[in-house]
Amino acid sequence: MDKDHTLVWQKCLKTIKKNINAQSFRTWFEPIKPAGLQGNVLTIQVPNKFFYEWLEEHYVALLRMTIRQELGEKGSLDYQILVNNKSKRIPGITQENPNGNRIEKQGFASEQIKNPFVIPGIKKLRIDSQLNPSYTFDNFIEGDCNRLARSAGVAVGKKPGGTAFNPLFIFGKVGLGKTHLAQAIGNEIKHKSPNRTTLYVSSEKFTNQFIESLKNNAVNDFVNFYQLIDVLIVDDIQFLSNKQKTQDIFFHIFNQLHQNGKQLILTSDRPPKDLVGVEERLISRFKWGLSADLQAPDLETRMAIIESKMSREGLAMPGDVTEFISYNIKNNIRELEGVMISLIAQSSLNRREIDIELAKEVIKNFVSEISKEVTVEFIQKMVAEHYELKVENLKGKTRKRSIVIARQLSMYLAKNMTNKSLKVIGDNFGGRDHSTVIYSCKAVKDLLDTDSLFKDTVETIEKKIKMSVHN
Ligand code: ADP
Ligand code: MG
């Protein structure tokens, strides 16, 4: 007896509807069309491969149960996937399938796809990359802090999808250039291979688009849209944390693109292994390619960044001011820029020259911990830092030569750079008396006269202290 496939599917839908919520039903089951019934194999047509994967992953048990209820113990399911508006058959895992579920690369009839970035009313599908053209490699200064990430980025820019760096996972703390670097890669690709579709999206925007598509019953369009992308840049991926559904959809998009040799570039404020609230399977995908970090720039790099930005603005910053800012703003390049911008604004508004004095005033708004004068503690801290010692070593009793020199130097600098008495200085060094301080100062002076290397060291430390806001 031949059953009618439409009828069978309608009955299935009834059961399914009872078992899942209305939204999921609308999203995942209403778009399905029954396509045929042969013996006990029901064929259903789904709009794309993603759809099929989603069903198999999330609804396999329900489907299996329903199909068997309608078609008996041997009942099973076949999928037809629309490829270029033609259909392609694949068996589902509801039917034991020895060949695996491999299907060919798909094409899409692009006029059907709704673009979540497109402004309503504009008919033509044109995917704007959403890139900011001012982020380039040219103005991304290289330093030890970013060398690996930058050169991996350059490689990806030359051969998107064609390097081992897929995904390229860029991580680092805030303000260290993740967005800049990721966009520079995108801009490079856009420039060098204009026929590739590049898209930059923050993970927040991605999430919102997905939620919107759920609301509008347009998850399909959302997924189809993302499958058109050749180079997908997702910024601040850590915001996907604890967003289960968005992670699911991203996982599928990631797989589709990766399988098809498309390039993925992701950024995050931490390495993949430290992402919390992110599914393990996603984290493992993130580790497939290269994870490269951006670290805080060293002094030279900070100075180079300032110089480069200023010269791009057609302005010149006095060298000592550049140095002064670089000494004081260490951990965040965005802050470095903030200081520069304020400085320029202050100088033009108040018709003042850009000098150290003005720089000090501006920097005070950026650095929280400021004291007016150099303190003995601060000198100790700077000297200890320089010699890679602990401050306690300077106060302690160790007679180790390197420590003794650092200790004597700290007393010498305290004597010369603060107006503290010999007694107070001595107290600060584990209760030594004033004659020890005098002796130390003399020892340092002697060494300064005879050892030019030591003299350089002292000058460097002195400069660091002076340059710091703490004076
Ligand atoms: P993140 O995304 O890591 O928070 P951004 O990419 O937004 O940081 O960088 C902050 C600012 O610092 C941007 O204006 C960027 O242009 C600048 N910047 C970061 N790294 C560099 C660099 N290596 N050379 C020049 N400018 C940089
Ligand atoms: Mg950023």
Image: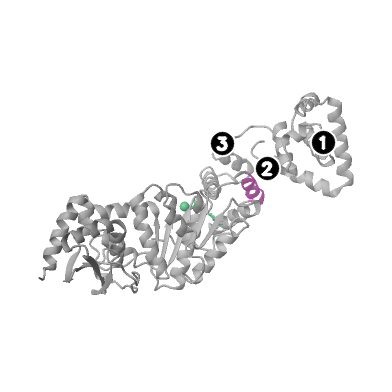
Which residue is painted at 44% across and 73% down in the image?
A: 193
Magenta stretch containing residue 408, yes or no?
no
Image height check: is 331 above or below 307? above
Which residue is painted at 27% across and 62% down in the image?
A: 221
Q: Amino acid at mark 1?
A: Gln
Q: Amino acid at mark 2?
A: Met
Sooner in the amino-acid sequence: mark 2 or mark 3? 3
* In front of the other: 146 or 272: 272
Provide the major secondary structure of the magenta segment: helix
Q: Which residue is mark 2?
A: 467
Q: Element type at marker 1?
A: helix
Horizontal relation, residue 469 to residue 152: left or right = right
Q: Which mark is residue 30?
A: none
Report how far apart the C-alphas of labels 2 and 3 lie in the structure: 16 Å
Q: Element type at marker 2?
A: helix
Rendering coords of residue 90 (x, y %): 28, 71
The quarter of the image holding the C terminus is top right
Rendering coords of residue 320 (x, y %): 67, 48
Horizontal relation, residue 403 to residue 200: left or right = right
Sooner in the amino-acid sequence: mark 1 or mark 2? 1
Q: Which residue is mark 3?
A: 368
Which residue is painted at 42% across and 47% down in the image?
A: 277
The total number of labels drawn is 3
Q: Is mark 1 within 8 Å of ligand 1?
A: no
First to last magenta residue range: 318-327
| Marks 1 and 2 close (CB-CB < 8 Å) | no
Q: Which residue is mark 1?
A: 408
